Amino acid sequence: MLGFVCFMEPGLFNAINGLGGGGQLDPTTNANSNVAIYSTSAVAGFFAGSINNKLGSKLTLQLGTIGYCLYIGSYLALNIHPNAGGFVVASGAILGVCAGLLWSAQGSLMLAYPTESEKGRFIAIFWSIFNLGGVVGSAVALAANFNNKEGTVGNGTYIAFIILTGIGTCIPMFMVDPKDIIRTDGTKVTVPLHPSWKTQFYGLYLTLKTDPMIMLLFPMFFSANWFYTWQFNDYNGFLFTLRGRSLNEFLYWTSQIMGSIAISFLLDSKLERRAQAFASWTVLLAMVFLTHIWAYFYQREYTRQTPPPDIDIYSRRYIGHVLLYICFGLLDSMWQTTSYWLMGAISNNASKLAIMVGFYKSFQSAGAAGVWRADAVKLPYMNIFLSTWLLLIAGLVSAFPMIYLRVKNHTELEDEMLERMDNGGHLRTVEEMRTEDWTS
């Protein structure tokens, strides 16, 4: 059900965004709107874990769904009223706050429910269902715009997406409360029990103070949405016809499903957890160099001043270009799945996971806001491409010592600082925790 919430909300958002320029002929409004989305999401995401732990994951998740319907509706308004660009940007700012809440709740639920040996599988199941939103959304866009010569998405496509996102806001009401969940090994999910806002924000501080190695993942988080701008606007949006862009998006989100499933087999393999972490890191490094060396030879052929080549699906040039786009989809899903898995390798506690996923979305959004602004002010395509490549490498280099020093084969109670914090903010010892468990 969590997957289907994101299928209806960020999944369809991805389908619209992935068409290049939000399906509009001029991508500037879309780029500015994305700056607003990721700027507010960066701020909201940093505190979203504490908000999630105070309000509960179900309510936080539902509040997070509201902005998506409004955002897609703003593009319908733009189609009808060409001067409604300000509404699109304002809707993006609202969506950013909602997205910060949604992803924090999502990450907490997805990583707290499985046992340690199932986390890769749970992430893959979620990522597959979530990306079906992009698959279905891009299929709808492809069918609706297959013979569209105008270069902009029609009203019918936006209306269909508005209806689907409206349905998605209702799904959290039917989800089981986390406190009633029993894992497959018989253990219960540890739900947040910290009632005051002061305690919540102290928990945020405590997470960084007691587990500073988390900060080595921040560059990996920062780069996790950076590459979308070049891929969506500066590659797919510039080079292809609307029909080509729509088919590319269908294949891109389909490859995301394949990538997350493939990497999950490695992350849940019979190797020890540390070996799984190093193996997945190596796969990501290889994929980054494979895709970006390939892409460099395409990128050096065009600039912002070059007339758009309008590569269509029947063009000879199409096959090589779309295969690269499929590989980018594989890399994206592997990068995101591994990022989530690394957080899950640090903790099994829902409170700490909500805060870590909040950090993840905060830095991810901060990076995205910066690069969308760079695209909006027409920074050269090659500059954006090279920054994408370098940041991905920097993220992996920074994560390596964290994997080496912090990832253990099993998570111990000593590492679960927030699980040991009582309602007043006092940090209980492991011995006190075990005495309480024995007494109860």
Image (tube, grey):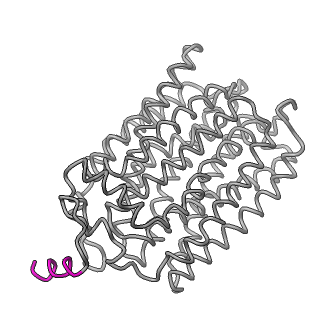
Q: Is residue 165 left or right of residue 391?
A: left
Left or right side of 187 for 296: right
- Quarter of the N terminus within the rendering: bottom left
Q: Residue furthest right?
A: 301
Residue 220 falls in image quadrant:
bottom right
Q: In percent of the image, x 55 and y 13: which residue is there?
A: 81
Q: Nearer the viewer, residue 324 or 398?
A: 398
388 vs 112: above or below: above
Nearer to me, 60 or 168: 60
Image x and y of residue 236, in percent: 73, 41
Q: Is residue 376 magenta?
A: no
Q: Position of residue 149 (x, y in %)?
A: 73, 26
| x and y, in percent, of residue 43 in the image | 45, 41
Q: Is residue 379 visible?
A: yes
Residue 61, placed above or below residue 420:
above
The reply to whether residue 55 is in sight is no
> Mostly what secondary structure, the magenta segment?
helix
Identify the residue at horizontal 20%, vertical 49% (top origin).
196
Number of numbered tags placed on the structure image: 0
Taking the image as shown, residue 300 lies to the left or right of residue 392, namely: right
State the extent of the magenta-drawn residues as a range.
431-440
State the residue at coordinates (52%, 30%).
Answer: 158
Closer to us: 260 or 106: 106
Task: Name the quarter where the C terminus is drawn.
Answer: bottom left
Q: Nearer the viewer, residue 226 or 163?
A: 226
Give x and y (percent) for residue 297.
87, 52
Q: Quadrant of residue 33?
A: top right
Q: Residue at x 81, y 35 (%)?
A: 310
Taking 171 as reference, is 439 above or below it? below
